[in-house]
Image (tube, rainbow, N blue to C red):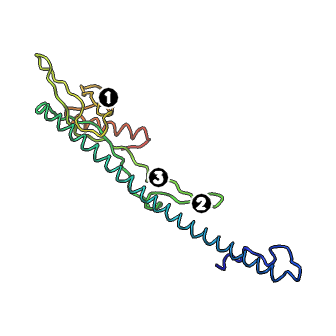
Amino acid sequence: MCYYDSWFEENWCEEPREEETALIEAIKENVRQDIKAEMERLRKENAELQQYKKERQEVENVKKWYESRLQTEVEAYKMELRTAKIKELFGDYIGIGWGVTWKLVLPPKCDKCDKDRMIHFKSPSGKDLTEPCKCAKGKKVFYPEELELIRIYQGRERIIRYYAPLKTDDDDFRDKRHSIYNGEPFDQVGLWSIVFLDKETCERYCAWKTDQEAKKDGKSI
């Protein structure tokens, strides 16, 4: 425990009288050793506490991961049950439609950035900074997504009505996707509410939407 010695200077209390020197030095040494022992005890206690906090955090992280996984599995099972029940009820009245989804397409990576497509540089003060490289900016590409629809016949004329997709990750989103495309101009179509009854029309809309997105970003396809 010699690293605590620097805490105590040679003369760390009043200079004693000559006849008291031996006694004072003995008392000083006892106090010194008591303080060093207490400091060492506190150091060890703090180290143990830090290890406990670390292990506790690891346990909490594992617990949260399993809770999240369980919740995901429960939601997936609930959706599976709902879908199975709907299919049991409607059977042959289930049809196929096409919605619109998208993905981000990145250009080929250049040789000026790191593996995460980040540019490294220094500020005027010498601080290390980063910013996204030009090749990290992609473009949205829209494409068709197959959906299962409930198809209901109404009235003597057997008018067909189509209702929301059976499978989607969001119940709120499920209720919004109910507009069947009926030949409207594409610029009047709601991206997240429209359902196409044939894939070819949906593909044309996706190509148009991709082109519009590129023009908005000042790009060319």
Name the image quarter holding residue 192: top left
Mark 3 or mark 2, whichever is nearer to me: 2
Name the image quarter holding residue 171: top left
Q: Which of marks 3 and 2 is nearer the N terminus?
A: 2
Where residue 49 is drawn, which disc sits there?
none
Check the image and report above or below for 123 versus 215.
Answer: below
Percent position of residue 221, x then y: 36, 44
Would you name the residue on which mark 3 appears? 134
Check the image and report above or below for 18 versus 122.
Answer: below
Would you name the residue on which mark 1 appears? 189
- Cα–Cα gap, marks 1 and 3: 32 Å
Mark 1 or mark 3, whichever is nearer to me: 1
SS at circle 1:
loop
- Cα–Cα gap, marks 1 and 2: 47 Å
Q: Which of 59 and 28 is in front in this view?
A: 28
Residue under the image location 26 percent in, 44 percent down:
76
Percent position of residue 24, x then y: 81, 78
Would you name the residue on which mark 2 appears? 122
